[in-house]
Amino acid sequence: METTRILIADDDKKTRDFVAAFLSYRGYQVFQASDGQDALEKIELNDVHLVITDIMMPRVNGLEFIKKLKAMRPEIVTIAYSAFANSEMTANLLKAGAFFYLEKPFNLEELETHVKRGLEHQALQNQSFRTKPCIKNRSLLNNIIGESDRMLALFELIEKVADSDSTVLLQGESGTGKELVARAIHDLSGRRTKNFVPVNCAAIPDDLLESELFGHVKGSFTGAVATRIGRFEMADKGTLFLDEIGDMKPNLQVKLLRVLQNRELEPVGATHSKKVDVRIIAATNQNLEKLVSSKEFREDLYYRLSVIPIMLPPLRDRKGDIPLLINSFMEKFNRDKQHKVKGLDRSALEILCCYDWPGNVRELENLVERLVILKGNGIITPHDLPDKYRGVRTSVIQETLALPEKGFCLNSAVEEFENKLILQALEKTGGNKKEAAMLLNLKRTTLIEKLKKKKLIFGPRMMSSS
Ligand SMILES: Nc1ncnc2c1ncn2[C@@H]1O[C@H](COP(=O)(O)OP(=O)(O)OP(=O)(O)O)[C@@H](O)[C@H]1O
Ligand SMILES: [Mg+2]
């Protein structure tokens, strides 16, 4: 059996040696690193299964390290420990992807119990990884990229529903891939050799939409110079994709409902109805339930459409897929534009993994296209990213702020906030004031002045504002 490889990161050599000796004795292969940066470098050289890390470390601290590690190698299990952590820190660690947090001093037997649990958890994850290929091939076939649990569940659902003729309602924010999924369902269905006909209900003027959908007979209205079949008939034996269904006007909603119930349509101006065999997939980025409550969307039509409701996750809920999406788009645009951009450096990737992507995959795809065009070759660094993305760190910090119920003293809170960030910048740069000032977008002299004024002291294991 393969020996389990564990890396322990701690700037305190004594603790490190102590834990390493115990784990080696228990049969693990152990590597050591003196801080987060050193650990990231060692992980690139040695394929480790699990990481045990201290939180307070110079250069790259434990939290930063875990965030970077999760972006780089999400499958590595991480156990963190510290003597200083509070509940907020613990929450941040777990949010960043740590498997478990231990308070120092801890018992080595206890540590090993968590190591074993972490490895079991990893084995389970790997099993689901191994079941991926058959799904992944199909998703690749249809260009839907994702390996997160949310996406795997989606692939499974798509496979299950594809071959039924049931009506599907795709809901999700703009850019989450609703059209891509609709096409995948059609391509995996028995109707794949027939037409997939999209209709954007929001893009066609209201008075034309009816004839666009159901067709018209010659002379039925001004401009109807010839009899024309509608999209329903074009999609006969195939799939009709009703996009932006939330924008359909009430009078047309009634007519659509009738077609869905009877599978018969009446072209504008016709006296007879026609049978159609069409599978319907509808999509919207609006909240249809809300539109139903406000009576803007018919409840009966809503139930007809949502026989199989599928909710597409926003990208911010599957951030683990961001590196995969970036790679895939980069490959595509390098190929299309004959460019040779190699990828993103760690900091740039970290920034993009922290960003919330309101425009979802479409926004990410557009950004990668822009980066490939502007960069041409080499590696993308944070400086290549538009300002909007670089500002993300500030917004991440702001998200953690909450006004206490009873109010508080703004001046001292601002002061404390500033102190914390200055100390974090110093910690991150191992006390290098020039680099810390750059991180804070300050002049070096301004930072030094602030440190003097605030009497802030920075030491490898000590942070104080006394
Ligand atoms: N999982 C994915 N993998 C690869 N590309 C994706 C994925 N999801 C979306 N895209 C790409 O993002 C872009 C937007 O996707 P799509 O048009 O399907 O979104 P949408 O949900 O229909 O958005 P809207 O509501 O604005 O119409 C497309 O170029 C699509 O190829
Ligand atoms: Mg769309």
Image: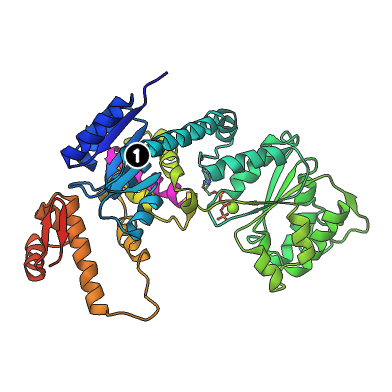
**Disc 1 C-beta below 8 A from ligand 1:** no
The residue that appears at 15% across and 66% down in the rendered structure is 465
Give above or below for 38 relative to 255.
above
In x, y percent, where is residue 428?
Answer: 19, 51
Q: Secondary structure at mark 1?
A: helix
- The answer to whether residue 204 is left or right of residue 54 is right
In x, y percent, where is residue 280?
Answer: 75, 49
Quadrant of the image containing the N terminus: top left
Q: Which residue is mark 1?
A: 111
Please state which of residues 118 and 444 is positioned toward the viewer in this rendering: 118
- The answer to whether residue 209 is left or right of residue 370 is right
The residue that appears at 62% across and 64% down in the rendered structure is 287
Quadrant of the image containing the C terminus: bottom left
- The answer to whether residue 398 is left or right of residue 305 is left
Name of the residue lying farthest toward the top = 1
Residue 365 is a magenta residue = yes
Quadrant of the rendered structure where residue 141 is? top right
User: Which span of residues is magenta-colored?
Assistant: 363-381
Residue 409 is at least partly visible in this image: yes
In x, y percent, where is residue 283?
Answer: 65, 54
Quadrant of the rendered structure where residue 339 is? top left
Amino acid type, label 1: Leu
The residue that appears at 14% across and 49% down in the rendered structure is 430
Q: Residues within 10 Å of mark 1 (few under 14, many from 20)?
A: some
Give above or below for 399 relative to 27.
below
In x, y percent, where is residue 201?
Answer: 67, 59
Residue 139 is a magenta residue = no
Quadrant of the rendered structure where residue 204 is? bottom right
